[in-house]
């Protein structure tokens, strides 16, 4: 008696959730494609964090002829004031108001009837206009009218059942803090929780978006920086390490640093796709080394980026011109000079711009000058370290050879400081520049480490000349 084999059943294919886009490509990337349709979402954040702009941009982007969008304002800002300031943004379209986007102020009804008036009011609107999206701003203000926590929970249970039955995607916007997420009932019934926050950093503010919860979605965790601009929100998804392909192998060829003697000290030059840390005090030749590296790449047909946070483009152009290179010609051949003022520097925005240049211009060499400015711009040393680690991995996967510059104030200070020591072990090579304070100034260069290379360990004197660097 033989046993016949039963055909195996095909693997179960998970149902793809329909989603609504936010109107912001970077926000959709963070959310895994947008918000699931018919979900209930809490959008939380203190006043001035950007949550209302985020919601309004989503609303105007999704407004159409099929089903309108309903925005209910409670006991927060007057409707006229909200619309007045929205008119300043390009996504605002007055023609959509009243037909595709319907604003209704229910503050007076809530003040007279309490929270019991909310569900009947929403049921009336849902049955009469059939909105596809409902926004309640501010939902947090309704808590002030609730006679008790059980009463608020009961109302929320009824509200969530109503919204689910009528297939509407809902956003409950409110001035919630961290302490509210664990105790208020709307956070328990919410399918998604999006948090906006702001923190002071010196003379400027840093703003972050974080997805605390999003059911059925593979969203990108962590804090994502953003700025409020004239066009709305510029969001910068947090950089994460790339997935290395199974067939990934390290590149075995060397590139020239632009200084032949340094190539010899490194055992033949930097490995392609490797990262190199150059540390030294002010005036020791770090910028000169970095520029020689990218200009050597141009001479070999390799597009390059020099990201700088100290010298402005005019100052860099003067240095490059001193090497006998025309900056406009270098730009035509693939040199990108990326400058950001250290006063307004935000690590999230600079990384987005870097990756855009790498992708669009097929960049093969990058210099970031200097890490200390990124450290000053970052409010979290650990977050900066994670950014640098992911950045180096992305460069490696793409075969981009990179140099990171760090300014030091003493012997090996760049190696022993928090950022220097952590970046030094992430880097494939570490070059230390030193100089004496007495005259005449003596400068030395030393290869502290170079992975996979029989490198020169000895310090060598060098001079900064009109054409670059000469190592003795």
Image (cartoon, grey):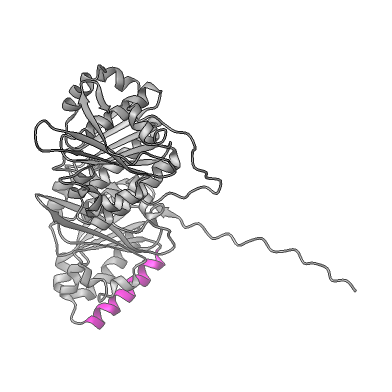
- Residue name at image x 53 percent, y 59 percent: 15
Is residue 224 visible in the rendered structure shown here?
Answer: no
- Residue name at image x 32 percent, y 46 percent: 24
x, y percentage for residue 466?
Answer: 20, 20
Left or right side of 212 for 92: left
Q: Quadrant of the C terminus?
A: top left
x, y percentage for residue 200?
Answer: 13, 55
Q: Where does the magenta region start and end?
A: 149-166
User: Foreground: 119 or 420?
Assistant: 420
Left or right side of 435 for 11: right
Q: Quadrant of the N terminus?
A: bottom right
Principal secondary structure, stretch drawn in magenta: helix
Left or right side of 441 for 211: right
User: Foreground: 154 or 378?
Assistant: 378
Note whether 337 is above or below 450 in the view shown: above
183 in magenta:
no
Note whether 444 is above or below 63 in the view shown: above
- Residue name at image x 32 percent, y 30 percent: 293
165 in magenta:
yes
x, y percentage for residue 142?
Answer: 19, 70
The image quarter in which residue 118 lies = bottom left
- Residue name at image x 19 percent, y 73 percent: 143
User: Foreground: 252 or 33?
Assistant: 252
**Farthest residue toward the right?**
1
The image quarter in which residue 264 lies = top left
The image quarter in which residue 158 lies = bottom left
């Amino acid at each position: 008696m033989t046993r016949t084999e039963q055909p195996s059943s095909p693997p179960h294919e998970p149902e793809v959730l329909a989603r609504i886009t936010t109107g912001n490509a970077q926000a959709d990337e963070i959310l895994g494609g947008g918000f699931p349709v018919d979900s209930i979402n809490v959008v939380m954040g203190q006043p001035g964090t950007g949550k209302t702009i985020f919601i309004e941009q989503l609303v105007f982007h999704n407004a159409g002829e099929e089903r309108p969008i309903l925005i209910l304002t409670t006991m927060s800002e007057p409707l006229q004031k909200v619309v007045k300031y929205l008119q300043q943004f390009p996504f605002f379209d007055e023609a959509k108001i009243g037909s595709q986007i319907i604003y209704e102020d229910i503050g007076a009804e809530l003040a007279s009837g309490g929270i019991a008036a909310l569900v009947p009011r929403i049921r009336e609107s849902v049955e009469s206009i059939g909105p596809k999206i409902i926004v309640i701003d501010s939902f947090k203000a309704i808590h002030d009218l609730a006679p008790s926590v059980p009463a608020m929970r009961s109302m929320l249970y009824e509200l969530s059942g109503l919204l689910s039955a009528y297939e509407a995607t809902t956003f409950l916007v409110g001035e919630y803090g961290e302490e509210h997420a664990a105790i208020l009932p709307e956070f328990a019934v919410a399918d998604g929780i999006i948090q906006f926050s702001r923190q002071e950093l010196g003379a400027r503010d840093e703003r972050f978006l974080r997805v605390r919860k999003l059911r059925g979605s593979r969203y990108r965790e962590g804090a994502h920086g953003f700025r409020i601009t004239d066009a709305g929100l510029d969001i910068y998804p947090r950089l994460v390490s790339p997935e290395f392909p199974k067939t990934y192998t390290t590149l075995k060829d060397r590139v020239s640093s632009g200084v032949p003697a340094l190539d010899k000290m490194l055992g033949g030059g930097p490995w392609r796709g490797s990262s190199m840390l150059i540390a030294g005090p002010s005036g020791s030749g770090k910028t000169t080394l970095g520029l020689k590296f990218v200009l050597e790449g141009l001479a070999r047909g390799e597009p390059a980026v020099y990201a700088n946070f100290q010298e402005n483009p005019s100052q860099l152009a003067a240095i490059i011109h001193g090497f006998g290179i025309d900056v406009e010609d270098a730009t035509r051949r693939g040199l990108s000079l990326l400058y950001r003022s250290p006063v307004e520097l935000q690590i999230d925005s600079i990384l987005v711009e870097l990756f855009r240049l790498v992708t669009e211009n097929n960049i093969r060499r990058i210099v970031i000058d200097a890490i200390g400015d990124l450290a000053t711009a970052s409010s979290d040393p650990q977050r900066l370290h994670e950014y640098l680690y992911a950045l180096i991995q992305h460069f490696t996967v793409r075969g981009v050879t990179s140099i990171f510059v760090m300014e030091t104030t003493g012997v090996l200070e760049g190696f022993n400081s928090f950022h220097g020591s952590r970046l030094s072990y992430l880097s494939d090579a570490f070059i230390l520049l030193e100089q004496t304070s007495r005259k005449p100034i003596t400068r030395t260069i030393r290869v502290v480490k170079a992975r996979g290379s029989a490198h020169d360990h000895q310090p060598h004197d060098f001079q900064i000349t009109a054409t670059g660097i000469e190592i003795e």
